[in-house]
Amino acid sequence: MENLDDELRDLSPLLRDLKRRGDGMRIPKGYFDDFEAKVFGRLEAHEPQTFASQPAHQPYNLLGKMVARVSWPVATQMVQRVLPLRRRAVPALMSMAAGLALITAAVWFFRSPAVVQTAPMLAQVTMPELSEDDIENYVLENVQEFEAVELASLPPAELGDEATPAEETVPKTPQHRSKRQQALDELRPEDLENALEGMSDEDLEKLM
Amino acid sequence: MALLRAAPTFERGFRQLMAQYRERLYWHIRRLVLVHEDADDVLQNTFIKIYRGVLQFEGKSKLYTWLYRIATNEALTHLQSKARHASASLDDAASVAAGRLQADPWFDGDDLQVRLQAAIAQLPDKQRQVFNLRYYEEMPYEEMSALLDTSVGALKASFHHATKKIEAAFRENE
């Protein structure tokens, strides 16, 4: 271990001399005797709860935590959980405000003129006013998500082969024959044979 | 530390810790901030920080190393705050330090000692810490190495540079 005096002898004789004179700094008499009280006074003034309930440090392990929880005085735990009333009221007030805002928005929406005027118009358009052809044309022109194979795999009831209440009420006339029926009628036996020749047994089973 | 780990003995443990380290930390802080009143404020803040954080001290370093770092941070923050308020640059550090020291009722040094403190105040933070630890506390380099997390060689070089800078500052003012 190198001695400072020896080190300074070579390095800086000036600093070696100054070191012997001291630094001229003093402290008030009894300063350290009062110091402890000053620190605890500040701690009590600024954070009395923390001061009263400084928890013990436990190395992390489940058993240790459980033991500490059980052995720690209940009163101290309660002191730790005490929140100022102002802070405790803030979440409740915010929840109430949010609830009121939601109710007001809902009332405003359902009572707004646009909604009130649109609702009867929507209710006026009813199914009986649409003919079967209108519906079919709409579906043929606008609904294209279904592949022919998918349609073929649907049970007949879903394809409308069985009479639906609408079909029962509407008399079947040549004008009301569906385009699919017309296409089937126009199919020639040769075309059917050609189509069947190109199909595998599995495809035929799917069609069945 | 054992007393600090149990709630019923925590306060007693903390009082013991204060009694053990307050004087050593005071002088470390005083030599950075120079004035007793400032050193008193910083030391109180340091122990309040220690009180709040001592349970998080994991024992990976020596306790004094941890305390020393808190005290150093508090002292440097205090000095930066003072410098901001006074709009003083680092170049003014020497004159500011000299002025404050001469106004401190708890300083009765002569002109040479004022000039020495003014020269030390001009050193960069880390170099000033190394100089103070070696020159005033006479801390061995090995211990300082653990405290500052710096190699012994680098600390010796730092102390060497610091002494040369201080001597140069003295020569300039002659």
Image (tube, coloured by chain):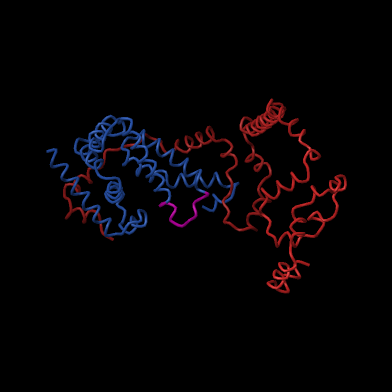
A170 on left or right of A52: right
Q: Nearer the viewer, residue B113 or A30?
A: B113
**Residue span colored magenta:** B55-65
Task: Spot the red chain and give its letter.
Answer: A
Q: Position of residue A84 (x, y in %)?
A: 62, 32
As drawn, B73 above or below A84:
below
Q: Position of residue A7 (x, y in %)?
A: 21, 56
A38 on left or right of B171: right
Q: Is residue A136 magenta?
A: no
For the image, the number of numbered tags is: 0
Which quadrant would residue A202 be assigned to in this image?
Answer: bottom right
Q: Nearer the viewer, residue B36 or A161?
A: A161
B58 on left or right of B72: right
Which quadrant would residue A27 be assigned to in this image?
Answer: top left
Q: Position of residue A118 (x, y in %)?
A: 71, 30
Which quadrant would residue B85 be assigned to in this image?
Answer: top left
Q: Nearer the viewer, residue B21 or A124?
A: A124
What is the quadrant of the N terminus of chain A in the image? bottom left
What is the quadrant of the C terminus of chain A in the image? bottom right
Q: Is residue B56 magenta?
A: yes
> Which residue is drawn at the image coordinates 50% and 48% (left, top)?
B54
Task: Spot the blue chain and give its letter.
Answer: B
